[in-house]
Amino acid sequence: MLSIENLTIGYKANRANQIVVAESINLTLNQGELVCLLGPNGAGKSTLMRTISGMQAPLAGNAFIDGEDIHSMPAQERAKRLSVVLTERVGAGLLSVYAMVGLGRYPHTNWAGKLSKKDHEIIQWAIQSVGAEELAHRSVSDLSDGERQKVMMARALAQEPRMMVLDEITAFLDLPRRVEIMRLLRKLARETNRAILLSTHDLDLALRSGDRIWLLPKGGTVQTGAPEDLVLNGAFEKAFSNEGVDFDRQQGAFRVHHSFRGSVNLVGEGILRYWTQRALEREGLETHDIDSNGSMRIEIEESGQGPVWRVSNGAETHKYNDLLSLTTHLRHTQKN
């Protein structure tokens, strides 16, 4: 459905000079597919999204939808093929949800903008598709961020596009709403056979939800593939290598670089050991199974009343029933 050929994106500083953000981009997007665009800040994700959606001209190369050049296509025809949902709030005034979704029909109406019976049926279908029936008669200005994004997706659906482009639409939502939106997008891709491209910083949800990933590193070549392929071939580690984090292939998540001030001999296993290690790293303590230097020893014991952490440092031994007490003690000890 979408074909990107030798695309160079960026800005024209003036008539003689241009600023290149990324170049030699060759990508495809298929119908019924949810693709997530990932990359560090400054890599050019938003610039790529604007260029693909026809909001910004490329410096070189082409982007085609159904074989037709997006940037030479008349605006009204482009709006019938492609819809866009952005992070920024759209000023809705006193519009109701139904009226806002109805704006998606205007590429299909005549010069007077009058909605037909078919238009109203499509508006109702779009609202129902995103699960916003109970919002239809409310004012857009009264909606929460999650509800508003559902409505904007319904408006985009009402355009009856072949492809939807969504730029960071989950950025200001809490975790349950982000999960809900990602599930909805995957469902829409499957049930309506539309191509959906989503840019996001939410790595975990992208890995779990995307059929494919477009990974755009700073100044590098776009990597594309199944999420698991890009984890296994080290593409994520390379893309974010200069961002102060490490990508953990086992956990499928990023780990913050820590500057360790000391070490601890940690005795324990399973989930208790994992979360204890996380807490200790935050305090600048590196953990070891065996430390011949005789550093502090922390032993995790499980009892009928819950876990216990025993801290031994020379002749002194302390016992704690939660990690907050343990880390507070360690912080106080380090200061002294």
Image: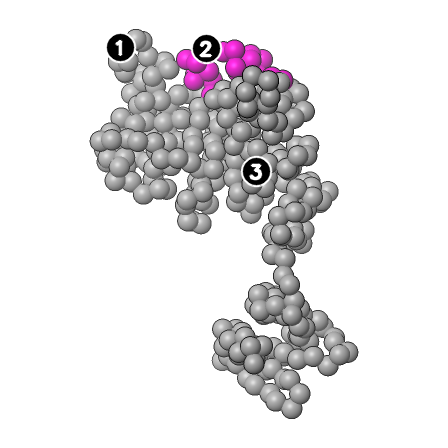
Q: Is mark 3 on a helix, strand or loop?
A: loop
Query: Quick one: which residue is furthest to the bottom in this view?
Result: 315
Comparing labels 3 and 1, the label whose residue is closer to the camera: 3
Q: In this view, does 158 lie to the left or right of 185?
A: left
Q: Which amino acid does label 3 sit on?
A: Gly
Screen quadrant of the C terminus:
bottom right
Q: Mark 2 points at which residue?
A: 74
State which quadrant residue 155 falls in: top left
Comparing labels 2 and 1, the label whose residue is closer to the camera: 2
Residue displayed at 56% across by 13% down = 69
Mark-to-mark CA distance, 2 and 1: 19 Å
**Which mark is on residue 76?**
none
**Which mark is on residue 42?**
3
Screen quadrant of the N terminus:
top right
Q: Name the residue under label 1.
A: 112
Residue 239 seen anywhere in this rendered image of the structure: yes
State which quadrant residue 116 falls in: top left
Look at the image and give the residue range highlighted in magenta. 61-82
Q: Which amino acid does label 2 sit on?
A: Pro
